[in-house]
């Protein structure tokens, strides 16, 4: 659970980075499992533009027992429940690979608008929990955020058909729907600056689904992989959408998660 000061920082800035939460042994096991999952020809796997480098995998909790347990770790799940004040289920689980020298940018965006437009979520009652599976540095594409930008509402909206149904991959390339243009980003950055979320492997990052974030290319010979769990409040029941995205992107099973008893 977070203490009062940590909750306040999350509410104020829209994110909270907690270093050294997972031990090297657990991180190593998850990191090895991710390499196994990258090699699976799974529908939820997205490649970089080169067509051969893994960019991201999705729905790992549905195909990996270890990931299903990781999603229920109290350091993740209980914090999501604490911040949302309700039970939660996993709307989406992904691993961004950000491979050495080839991991490409993620343009500046807010997450909620994707889940609202494509998955029917009605309110941003979601907590994103990221697990650093490698160290994030200023040179390997660490996540960048605009502190406090979660209080500005949806900045790039509009009814975009792409990315729904089976065209979902459009939103996982380096050219996504709802990316912020320079003229939209400029005033935010002028007022609030940009924070680079560097930290050691085993760190946890909690962030609001309205927070403006993105990441640059990985310029180093080390990967910068991160597992991301998007916990939706069980009270935030999605509306039906005309062209639902695949189950590995938008969970249909909304049973509240139970905290894992015992070790990972
Ligand atoms: O469309 C989605 O669900 C995903 N797309 C982005 C760019 N971030 C949020 C989410 O993981
Ligand atoms: Fe995102």
Image: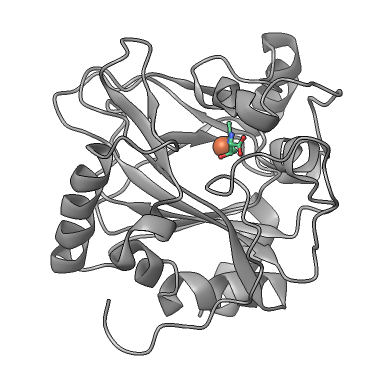
Which residue reaches farthest bottom?
261
Q: Is residue 250 left or right of residue 262?
A: right
Q: Is residue 70 left or right of residue 187?
A: left
What number of labels is visible? 0
Name the residue located 19 percent from the left edge and 23 percent from the top edge.
220
Q: Position of residue 232 (x, y in %)?
A: 67, 62
Name the residue located 33 percent from the left edge and 60 percent from the top edge.
19
| Type of colouring | one colour
- 260, 8: nearer the viewer: 260
Quarter assignment of residue 44: top left
Q: Is residue 142 visible?
A: no
Q: Position of residue 194 (x, y in %)?
A: 54, 31
Q: Is residue 261 visible?
A: yes
Q: Is residue 105 left or right of residue 243?
A: left
The answer to whether 192 is drawn above or below residue 148 in the figure is above
Name the residue located 51 percent from the left edge and 73 percent from the top edge.
77
Name the residue located 62 percent from the left edge and 28 percent from the top edge.
166
Q: Position of residue 134 (x, y in %)?
A: 23, 45
- 131, 6: nearer the viewer: 131
Q: Position of residue 129 (x, y in %)?
A: 50, 57
Q: Quadrant of the image for the C terminus? A: bottom left
- 88, 128: nearer the viewer: 88
């Amino acid at each position: 659970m977070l203490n009062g000061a940590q909750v306040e920082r999350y509410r104020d800035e829209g994110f909270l980075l907690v270093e050294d939460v997972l031990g090297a042994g657990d991180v190593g096991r998850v990191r090895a499992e991710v390499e196994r999952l990258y090699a699976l020809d799974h529908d939820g796997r997205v490649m970089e533009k080169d067509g051969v480098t893994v960019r991201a995998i999705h729905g790992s909790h549905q195909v990996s027992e270890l990931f299903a347990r990781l999603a229920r770790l109290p350091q993740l799940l209980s914090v999501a429940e604490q911040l949302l004040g309700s039970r939660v289920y996993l709307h989406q689980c992904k691993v961004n690979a950000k491979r050495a020298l080839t991991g490409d940018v993620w343009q500046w965006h807010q997450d909620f608008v994707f889940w609202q437009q494509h998955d029917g979520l009605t309110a941003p009652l979601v907590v994103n929990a990221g697990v650093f599976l490698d160290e994030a540095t200023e040179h390997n594409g660490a996540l960048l955020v605009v502190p406090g930008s979660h209080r500005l509402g949806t900045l790039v909206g509009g009814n975009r058909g792409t990315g729904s149904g089976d065209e979902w991959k459009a939103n996982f390339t380096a050219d996504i729907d709802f990316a912020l243009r320079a003229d939209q980003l400029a005033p935010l950055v002028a007022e609030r600056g940009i924070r680079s979320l560097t930290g050691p492997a085993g760190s946890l990052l909690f962030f609001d689904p309205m927070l403006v974030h993105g990441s640059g290319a990985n310029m180093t010979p080390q990967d910068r992989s991160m597992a991301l769990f998007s916990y939706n409040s069980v009270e935030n029941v999605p509306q039906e959408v005309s062209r639902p995205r695949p189950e590995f992107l938008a969970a249909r099973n909304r049973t509240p998660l139970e905290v894992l008893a015992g070790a990972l």
